[in-house]
Image (tube, grey):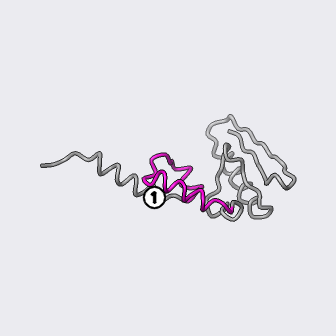
Amino acid sequence: MLFGWLSQASEPFYTISLFCYHEPRTAFYALAGFLARALNRLHRACPHWGKYFPLGYADIEEYYPRLPAFRAICERHDPRGTFRNAYVNRVFGFTRARARADAGAAERAAPLHL
């Protein structure tokens, strides 16, 4: 597992990389989650999107002013949330849309009783 940090290009940025190959990774996730929340609240830091990312939509929305426009594009082109997963829902705040999509998929998969 890798845990890394990014910041805005207009500001200096620093990276912290943590690796963990030992199973179970409970201690790693606890430390990485603590660091993510602390650095986010104290220094407006955000983890790298492609690494372990324990933050949610409420933690990052103020740093990405165009996120509502991105969400609108996603809703317009993927209203059922077909191309979303739990990570995308949590980070971009799509939980309600995905729940509707999951319910619709379950409904379509249910056998017909005549």
Which percent across, then down, holds residue 107?
Answer: 29, 51
In the picture, measured across the screen, residue 91 lies left or right of residue 17, that is left
Determine which residue is flagged by label 1: 97
Q: Main secondary structure of the magenta part?
A: helix
Outermost residue, top direction? 21
Specify the amino acid type for callout 1: Ala
- Residue at figure coordinates x 49%, y 56% from the top left: 76
In the picture, measured across the screen, residue 36 lies left or right of residue 90, that is right
Look at the picture and state if 63 lies above or below 19: below
Q: How many marks?
A: 1
Q: Residue 83 in magenta?
A: yes
- Residue at figure coordinates x 56%, y 58% from the top left: 71
In the picture, measured across the screen, residue 111 lies left or right of residue 30, that is left
Residue stretch in magenta = 65-93
Q: Looking at the rendering, in which quadrant would you find the N terminus?
A: top right
Outermost residue, right direction? 12
Residue in front for this viewpoint, 41 or 112? 112
Assign a secondary structure to mark 1. helix
Q: Quick one: label 1, few (<14), some, or many (20+) residues within 10 Å?
A: some
